[in-house]
Image (cartoon, grey):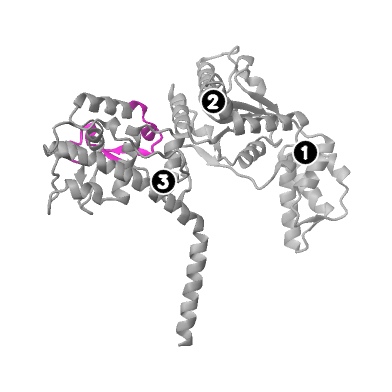
Amino acid sequence: MEHEKSKEGNNRDFSYKYNRSLKVDLLTIGKNSKDIIGDLNWLERILNARLSKLENKTATDLAFHDEVPPALNDSDSPYANLINEFQLSAPERLLLICSLAPHVSPELFTSKLKKSNSFDIQYPQLGGYIDSTFHVFMPNLQTALHLLAGEDQTNASYYHIGFMEQSVLIREQIVNLVAVRTEMEGSLRQQVIELAQEYLYYFISGKKPMPDFGKAFPASLITTSMNWDQLVVSDYAFNELQRITRWAKSGKELVKLTDNKLSASFACLFYGPPGTGKTLAAQLLGKTLKRDVFRIDLSMIVSKYVGETEKNLAYLFDRAEGKDWILFFDEADALFGKRTDISDSKDKWANLEMSYLLQRMEEYQGLTILATNLKANLDSAMNRRFQSSIYFGRPTQEQRKQQWIKLLPEEFSYKNIDMDKLAKHDLTGGNIINILKASCLEAFHRGDNKITGQDLADAIMREFAKEGRTP
C-alpha cells in the first residue's frame, strides 16, 4: 500500500514537473490550434461550395474572394506569425492550409472525397489521391486550383502561374510540390502539396525552423556567450556597431515612414587583420538583436563553372529572405579581384561574382556583413555600396591590457602576473583567447585554477610560433 501511495505521489510529481516545463509550449499549442481550426473551417466552407456546384445543388460557382479567411493580425501563434511575416495572400494561405490539413484534420477531405471501401475519388475535378497506407486523401496542386477557381480554367491557369512564379511558400520551400508515381505523373497539377517537416514542427512547438545545412544552405549558425565589454575595439568601431544596432531595431519603421523610399537592406564591411573581433562583433549583433547569425561558407558557393557561383548565391539569398537572419560572409577574399587590374578571364569572372554578391546584399531586406582581411582588393566603386565600413585594427597596448583582464574566465585567477608586461606583446584578441584557453587547461589540470606566469609564457611562445614570429 505504501509502495502504491509512493508510486502515485511520484506520478503526480512527474505530471506537475512535466506540465510546468511545457507551460509555454501548451500555451503556444492552444493559440496555434485556434488559428489553424479557423483556417480549416474556412477551407471546409470553400470545399463545400465547390462540391455543391459539382453535385448540381447550386447553379453558380463560388467567387473565391467572397469567402474571406479569418483575420490573424492580432495573433502571435506560430501559424499566424508565418502568415503575417511572409504577408501571404489568400490564395497562398489556402495552399498552406491544404498542405497542413492531412496532418491535423485528415478527415476533412477524406470523408467528402473518398469513395467507400476503395481507393477511388468521388470527384476527379478536385485532383488528389488516396494514400495506400493510411487511406487518407492527399491534396495536390489540382485540388488547390479547383478550390480557388472552380470550373473556371482561365482563373485556374492564372493561379497556377502565380504559384509557380511568385509564391513565397514554394520559393522558401515551406511547401514543396512533389511528383507521385501515377498514370499522370508528368502533369504539373498532379504534384502533391507537401508541407516541409520543419514547418510542421514549427506549428506544433513554436520553434523557428533552421535551414538544412550543407550544399543546399552552406552556412553554420554562430553564437557567443561573450558580451560587448569583452569586445575591445576603437571608439569609432564601437559607435558604428551601435549605429548598425539602431538601424536593425528601427529600420523597418523608418522605411514605412518614408513610404518605402528607403531600402530596408543594410550591408556592412568589416575589415582588418585576423583575430581582431570581426566575427565576435557579428555574433554580438545577433545576440543583441535576438537574431540568428549564419556564417556563410564561400568555399561551397564559389564554383569554377561560369554562372554557377551566382546561381548558388541567388539560392542562398532566396532561402534567407524574410527570415530576419544576419548573413555573415567571412573571409570573402576568395571573391575579390580589382576591376582595374584584370589579367585574365578568371579575374573578370571574379569581379562579376563580387558585383553580384554586393547587388544581392543591397537587395536583401535585412543585415548582411562582409568580412575580409584585405580591403585593398575591393575597389572604391564597390566600397560605396556598403552602409557601414568598419576597420578592426590590431589593439593598442592599453586595449590589450583590457583584453587580458576582461577575457579571463571568472573561475580562474592570475598568480603574480604583471598586466603591463603582458600587454606589451603584440597580440590580437584572438591570440589572447587562444593563450588563455591553453593556460586555463594547465591550471585546471593542476587542480588549483590559478594561472601562473610560466603557463602564460609557454602559451605565448606557441602562439607567436604559429605566426612565424618571436615575442
Is residue 144 visible to us here? yes
Q: Amino acid at mark 2?
A: Lys
- Alpha carbon of mark 3 to alpha carbon of mark 1: how far? 44 Å
Q: Do the numbered discs 3 and 2 sit on residues whose CB atoms are within 8 Å?
A: no
Q: Residue at x 75, y 43 (%)?
A: 432
Location of residue 224 by image quarter: top right
- Per the image, the residue denoted by label 3 is 198
- Between 448 and 118, the one nearer to me in the picture: 118
Q: Residue furthest top?
A: 340
> In this image, 421 relative to 300: left or right?
right
Inter-mark Cα distance, 2 to 1 = 45 Å
Up the image or down, 380 lies above or below 165; here it is: above
Task: Mark 2 and mark 1 in contact? Answer it, CB < 8 Å.
Answer: no
Residue 256 got which mark? 2
Quarter-wise, where is residue 230 in the image? top right
Against 300, is 260 above or below? above
| Closer to the camera in the image, 219 or 240 | 240
Residue pushed farthest bottom?
A: 1
- Find numbered disc 1 in the image and state the secondary structure of the residue it sits on: loop
The quarter of the image holding the C terminus is: top right
**In the rendered image, is residue 183 in sight?**
no
Q: Position of residue 386 (x, y in %)?
A: 61, 22
Q: Nearer the viewer, mark 3 or mark 2?
A: 2
Magenta includes 168? yes
Q: Nearer the viewer, mark 3 or mark 1?
A: 3
Mark 1 — residue? 427
Q: Earlier in the sequence, mark 3 or mark 2?
A: 3
Which segment did they paint magenta? 165-193
Residue 19's label in the rendered image is none
Instruction: Point out residue 422 in the picture as x, y percentages from the top left corner.
Output: 84, 44
The kind of residue tagged 1 is Leu
Which residue is pictured at 63% across the width and 26% down the height? Answer: 269
